Amino acid sequence: MKKLSEAAVSQKLKTLEKWRIKEEKWIERRYRFKDYLEGIRFVNKLAEAAEEVNHHPFITIQYKLVIVELTSWSENGLTDLDFDVAIQYEKLYKEMV
Amino acid sequence: MKKLSEAAVSQKLKTLEKWRIKEEKWIERRYRFKDYLEGIRFVNKLAEAAEEVNHHPFITIQYKLVIVELTSWSENGLTDLDFDVAIQYEKLYKEMV
């Protein structure tokens, strides 16, 4: 996986409107849930998906808010993999709510 | 639940050696796991316990590190409940590792 240029990142973010760039090398999305355990079920889905591709987002659970952050440590920045899994997370979310 | 004094908090922390105070109104503990999904299983146990007593910690999952933060929003500080659940989390952790 190759680190993406700033222009490539901007381009990719156009189709992921709820994600935002954070401190240059992260993309972040905040997911809100109607109840706490629904958020926890989502975290479990993310974790399963993360383990499958060996790419693990940082996840913060603040009651009904689940914050997901992605980066590619090996490249010290963002790669196609971050965007591929972000798209996958959007699908998992849509299946739930 | 009544907000605890600084002295009471210090006293209670003596028996919770891995917990530390953070920004006056939080207590925090960092749990490390041998593998990612073990950490996720722990998060599920915390979530279940949290829902039972309707007191929800902030939880951050950074790969094999799970950071747990507790406060009592209603009191804008720490109460007995925070320490009661911290003790419970320690038991849940010891059952796992």
Image (cartoon, coloured by chain):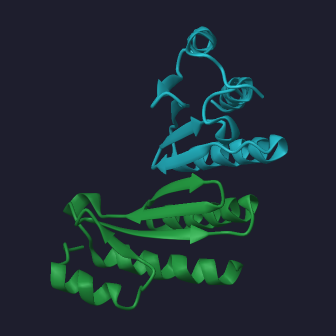
Chain colours: A green, B cyan
Q: Position of residue A19 (x, y in %)?
A: 41, 77
Residue A74 can be seen, yes or no: yes
Location of the N terminus of chain A by quadrant is bottom left
Location of the C terminus of chain A by quadrant is bottom right
Q: Where is residue A35 in the image (x, y as percent from the top left)?
A: 75, 64
Given the current orientation, which residue lies at the most extreme right position?
Answer: B52
Place residue B26 in its image quadrant.
top right
Q: Where is residue A29 in the image (x, y as percent from the top left)?
A: 46, 71
Q: How many labels does the image show?
A: 0
- Write the residue at 67% across / 63% down: A39
- Write the residue at 72% across / 30% down: B85
- Write the residue at 57% across / 62% down: A66
Place residue B1 in its image quadrant.
top right
Note whether A79 is above or below A47 in the view shown: below
Q: In this view, does A14 lie to the left or right of A46?
A: left
Q: Nearer the viewer, residue B34 or B46?
A: B46
Q: Which of A85 and A31 is in front in this view?
A: A31
- Write the residue at 30% across / 79% down: A80
